[in-house]
Image (cartoon, helix red, strand yellow):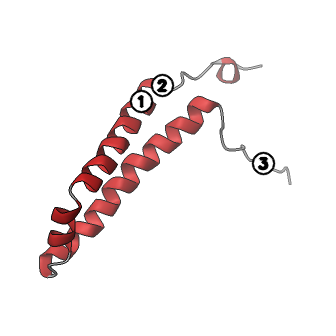
Amino acid sequence: MNNCSMTKKKKPYVRTLIFGALSVCLYIALLNHQELVNGNFAQGGLYAVLPIATAFIFSFIHGSFTGHFWTVMGVEPAKKIKEAK
């Protein structure tokens, strides 16, 4: 066995907690300020960028949390085995 297969990866507990907390804070802020969000997002023009930017931010933060969460839980993608020709 080589040393690479023997090394154990550290699980990202702290990153999971940080991104989880950020995700919860984003959803709480969004729900607590619905009138402000709806008013600004519906104005059109340059304000049309706001919903797109918000979706990207939510996607990045929540996606990072989800990825780290599954890593902490021990769920990893299967590695492809190269076929010999």
Q: Which residue is mark 2?
A: 13
52 to 63, vertically: above or below = below
Quadrant containing the N terminus is: top right
Quadrant containing the C terminus is: bottom right
Whether residues under marks 1 and 2 lie with C-beta atoms below 8 angstroms apart, the answer is yes
82 to 19, vertically: above or below = below
At horizontal 16% and vertical 71% (from top left) the residue drawn is: 39
What is the secondary structure assignment of the residue under circle 2?
A: helix
72 to 34, vertically: above or below = above
Q: Which residue is mark 3?
A: 82
Q: Which residue is mark 1?
A: 17
Name the one closer to the observer, 4 or 63: 63
Instruction: Give the residue type that dot 2 points to.
Output: Tyr
What is the secondary structure assignment of the residue under circle 3?
A: loop
> Residues under labels 1 and 2: Cα distance?
6 Å
At horizontal 13% and vertical 81% (from top left) the residue drawn is: 45
Number of the label disc, if any, that sits on residue 63: none
Task: Give the side of residue 51 with respect to residue 84, left or right.
Answer: left
> Residues under labels 3 and 2: Cα distance?
32 Å
List x then y, in percent, for residue 80. 74, 47
Task: Give the side of residue 65 with respect to residue 25, left or right.
Answer: right
What is the secondary structure assignment of the residue under circle 1?
A: helix
Task: Give the side of residue 5 with respect to residue 56, left or right.
Answer: right
3 vs 1, front mark: 1
> Residues under labels 3 and 1: Cα distance?
36 Å
Whether residues under marks 3 and 2 lie with C-beta atoms below 8 angstroms apart, the answer is no
Q: Quadrant of residue 43?
A: bottom left
At horizontal 62% and vertical 31% (from top left) the residue drawn is: 73
List x then y, in percent, for residue 49. 21, 71
Give the mark nearer the N terminus: 3 vs 1: 1
Instruction: Give the residue type that dot 3 points to.
Output: Lys
Category of crowding for the residue at label 2, using alpha-carbon neighbours closer than 10 angstroms: few (below 14), some (14–19), many (at least 20): few
